[in-house]
Amino acid sequence: KTSFVGQEIFYYPKTESTNLIAKNMAMDGAKEGTVVTAEEQTKGRGRLDRNWLSPAYKNILMSILFRPEVQPSQVFSLTMLTSLAVVKAIKTITTLNALIKWPNDIYIGSKKIGGILTEFSAEQDRVNFVIVGVGLNVNFDPSIYPEIKDTATSLSKVLGKEVSRIALLQSILEEIEKGYNLFKKGRVTQIRSEWNTHSLITGKTVRITSFGITEEGVAESVDEDGCLILLDYKGKRKRIFSGDVSLKIDVNHITK
Amino acid sequence: KTSFVGQEIFYYPKTESTNLIAKNMAMDGAKEGTVVTAEEQTKGRGRLDRNWLSPAYKNILMSILFRPEVQPSQVFSLTMLTSLAVVKAIKTITTLNALIKWPNDIYIGSKKIGGILTEFSAEQDRVNFVIVGVGLNVNFDPSIYPEIKDTATSLSKVLGKEVSRIALLQSILEEIEKGYNLFKKGRVTQIRSEWNTHSLITGKTVRITSFGITEEGVAESVDEDGCLILLDYKGKRKRIFSGDVSLKIDVNHITK
């Protein structure tokens, strides 16, 4: 049901990391839309080299190769459209409402169910390729892992039943293709505004810790470069790069 | 005479492209400062996939691996410090005054003698590695190549005698290390202001063609993101991304 995303899917029972495989394929000339999936990763990673825990045959682990004709500053749109695609596909397949926690996580309620890892290769003024990796907890039971049991969940855990990974993967790829077609038509504003309506933190009070300095304020929106616009208590707006922050969402605001 | 740049030099009589080799080494974990040199490239490239012509055993072809802790928008500083290093080394070894033509070319007079090709691998908010490639015409006679004889020159052609490639390479690596140490100390403003004093186009009238649209104005400076600040005839300042432009320098201004 897609015309280019996932027309070529490389499947690995076990591999180091789907992003790494996809990067190597990209360097060897693989086509836009190539998808790499695995059941298990020996070096699964999240953003900033954090470990990505995912037991075999339970979840979705995949990477998609894009070759957009854009500048490095425009790459965040691909993270946006992919996270949006994941949220929409979850809605379609399970009816659950997932939300996106800027910059790259997928949440249900106050728990994480997935993440996006975007990596790219570029020259000063143009991108060669972008790899967008998706890790999504589907039929996984995080409660048996002490290090994540309080912070992570999965679709099956929330639903109380297993979810078809194939149907979900198919739906995600379809949504990504739709989003990428919008992106190629330059309709980035549409993607961004839709992303903002699915944002976990928009309008909420957040605490941001960056190099030991903590800032608080209301998360207003995310701009076209992927920066968070934070309105602090003095009414001053700040533009925050994702790399600088960890978000501490005020639980009182989330749950109300 | 360097402490990390070029402590490991990989030398190839013939290879596809030093940037490609360096990228592969970087993905396999090679150390910052690793240098790849070749006598001949089968797939030598300039910016935007343009061909890079260089006969064997005549010129300098090399790539340096950096692992700076920066965001993608800061990568242009490495192109700046490398082009500055090349210009300074040329001055030291030959006494010739080379200039930098934004964004990435080295000129003597109105002819090109070299170029920089910066490529990098990144996540949204941090750089994994940067490869800076340098191609420099040293003892090459471009007059025998019809496609470049009117636009390119070399150090030996300007001087009327051959230049030691080893001495020049050594000097470039030393200057790169000095510049990179400044960069790591955050002294980007110093690098940029020095770069601007060695700029071929600063203060000159330039014509910029981008997607078929031509703009003219005075090149004022290059900002910290590597954008050219152009003052047009209406007194309006424009910020131009390198990817969008080709420069047509007004010959009357250059030669005066």
Image: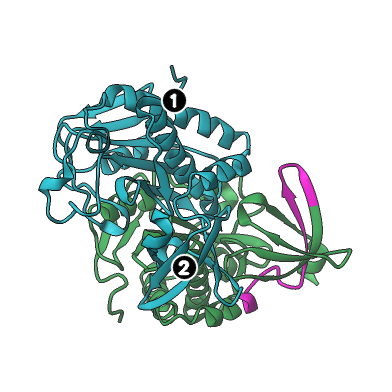
Chain colours: A cyan, B green
**Residue at horizontal 45 percent and vertical 23 percent from the top:** A4
Name the image quarter holding the N terminus of chain A.
top left
Residue nearest the viewer, comparing B183 with A217 = A217
In the current view of this chain or complex, which residue is farthest to the top?
A1
Q: Give the answer, above or below, for where A158 lies relative to A144.
A: above
Q: Could you tell me if residue B253 is visible in this image?
A: yes
Category of crowding for the residue at label 2, using alpha-carbon neighbours closer than 10 angstroms: few (below 14), some (14–19), many (at least 20): many
Which residue corresponds to mark 1? A174
The magenta stretch spans residue B208: yes
Q: Give the answer, above or below, for where B237 lies relative to A226.
A: below
Magenta stretch: give its range. B196-214
Q: In which quarter of the image is residue B38?
A: bottom left
Q: Residue A139: x and y, percent?
A: 20, 33
Chain assignment, label 1:
A
Q: Are marks 1 and 2 in contact (CB under 8 Å)?
A: no
Q: In which quarter of the image is residue A214?
A: bottom left
Which residue corresponds to mark 2? B78
Q: In which quarter of the image is residue A206?
A: bottom left
Q: Do labels 1 and 2 share a chain?
A: no
Name the image quarter holding the C terminus of chain A.
bottom left
Residue nearest the viewer, comparing A209 with B200 = A209
